[in-house]
Amino acid sequence: MPALKSFDPKVISLLQEKIKLIKTDKGAIYLVGPIKLPVNLLGETAQFNWYCWLNCSEVTEDFERIVAKLSAANLAEFQQSSVLVHGDFENADHALIRFHSICHTGDIFGSKRCDCGYQLKQSIKHIAEHGSGALFYLANHEGRGIGLFSKALAYILQENGYDTVDANLQLGFVDDSRDYSDAIKVLQALRIKPVTLITNNPRKLDALSKAGLDVEDRVQLWGDVSEYNEKYLKTKIERSGHLNEGKGEGCCNND
């Protein structure tokens, strides 16, 4: 095994102050942050703190060793999740959180086939207006956990009459294989007080409840309904059990 790169002690000192070790059943999560991140929010600048985390089988507080191994790991080929924090998230009496699954087509390209891009922007807006909160951007959740390439195949089936649930099933996947355990561990490292979850998805509520977290309220997030995603949104409610209480920005109530 080649010798690991050595670093300037000042560099390691700066990095160690921003790295937190979170032990897991499979090894460790290394949480990096906070990093100041000014965000363009509807033309105004809102100040957030950004964190990123990495799963690793090695458990050590020798962070220089972990950093030295990164250059050989080619992490650009793998996805890492992160969290965007606003305000005094740790201590605020009430804080909003959003577990947002990556959506390459919706978040980046602004696709109208789903409501993901809308939910991402609105969640950040809600958190900033509330004053404290965190948006967890979960990078291994593309296509409800099937990955981007398989999602493209599912889109082909959807263009031929299958809904989102059946398209995933026909490709040999379950409807939704997303796992929130890592995000929950990071949340517990950042805050122990109750949270309000921005979601329409009861599975996210269940995941937090089973982990023993105190969810004091839920904010639903429907909107951006169009001819392109109306069937997709109805399928969320009718087949995936998403919650629609007919409040706020209603969903699919125009027929």
Image: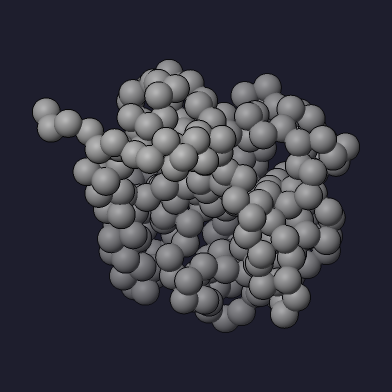
Q: Against 128, is 75 above or below?
A: above
Position of residue 156 measured from the top left corner of the image (x, y, whole percent): 31, 70
Q: Against 15, is 213 above or below?
A: above
Camera-side residue: 23 or 127?
23
Q: Quadrant of residue 55?
A: top left
Position of residue 228 measured from the top left corner of the image (x, y, whole percent): 53, 78
Please count the marks in the image.
0
Q: Quadrant of residue 151?
A: bottom left
Q: Against 215, is 81 above or below?
A: below
* Residue displayed at 54% across by 31% down: 20
Q: Is residue 58 left or right of residue 20?
A: left
* Residue displayed at 30% across by 54% down: 76
* Residue displayed at 68% across by 22% down: 212
Identify the colour scheme used: one colour
Position of residue 168 measured from the top left corner of the image (x, y, whole percent): 36, 53
Position of residue 53 measured from the top left corner of the image (x, y, whole percent): 48, 41
Question: Can you say which quadrant of the picture contains the C terminus?
Answer: bottom right
Residue 57 in view, yes or no: yes
